[in-house]
Image (cartoon, rainbow, N blue to C red):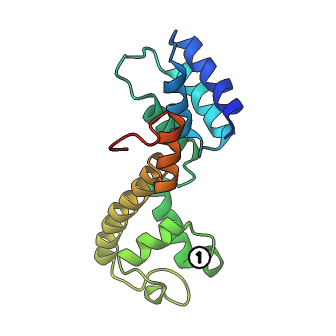
Amino acid sequence: MTEDDFHAGFSVFMATFDKNYPPATLRIFYGLLKDLNPESFLVAVQAICVEQKEFYPNTNVVALIRHKVADLENDLPSSEEAWEQVVAASRDVRARGSLHPEIKRAIKAVGLEYHTIEPGGGFCLAADQIAFIRKDFLKFYASFSKQGHDEKVVPIMSKIEAKDLLRQVGFEGKEGA
């Protein structure tokens, strides 16, 4: 995202909540948000401005925006929808290739590899085994999808990016930085 994109979206935010941040704070915010897709950032800011009734002094603005962006960009089906896709894939070989990687990861985690699927379709397991596997699948899938969401919210910042951010806000060369 460019600084112009950031300032366009953030001015709407500041006007909505009657906030004024000093330039150094805005540089920090931009440094922590610049990796976001500009369209997603603008949509997230607009959604926050429309949905958020009050804005408290201690609200972490960066986290609020990053969480909203991650929520908006979440392309994962719900746990129940994911399980339905697994069941459908057990009946249709062509559907297996289109499963989301997180669904495939959960399938592997519960040991429901495709060798347990009968050639004619369906699971080659007893009904009580499927119920236990379903329960475990839902648990693993929820965990994996939360992990993916959290990685979008808190990206890993390289040392170079961290030093660049510190330089932008005037901490370059200071002791302890």
Q: Which SS class for mark 1?
A: helix
Q: Is residue 66 left or right of residue 112?
A: right
Q: Is residue 90 above or below residue 159?
A: below
Q: Residue drawn at (30%, 77%), measured in percent from left and top?
A: 129
Q: Residue drawn at (31%, 65%), measured in percent from left and top?
A: 135
Which x, y percent locates residue 163?
48, 48
Q: Is residue 83 above or below residue 78?
A: below
Q: Residue drawn at (53%, 66%), measured in percent from left and top?
A: 85
- Amino acid type at circle 1 is Arg
Q: Is residue 61 left or right of residue 10?
A: left
Q: Residue drawn at (53%, 55%), measured in percent from left and top?
A: 76
Total labels: the figure holds 1
Which x, y percent locates residue 71?
51, 42
Quadrant housing the N terminus: top right
Front residue (pair 147, 32): 32
Q: Which residue is mark 1?
A: 96
Which x, y percent locates residue 106?
41, 70
Which quadrant of the view contains residue 23? top right
Front residue (pair 31, 137): 31
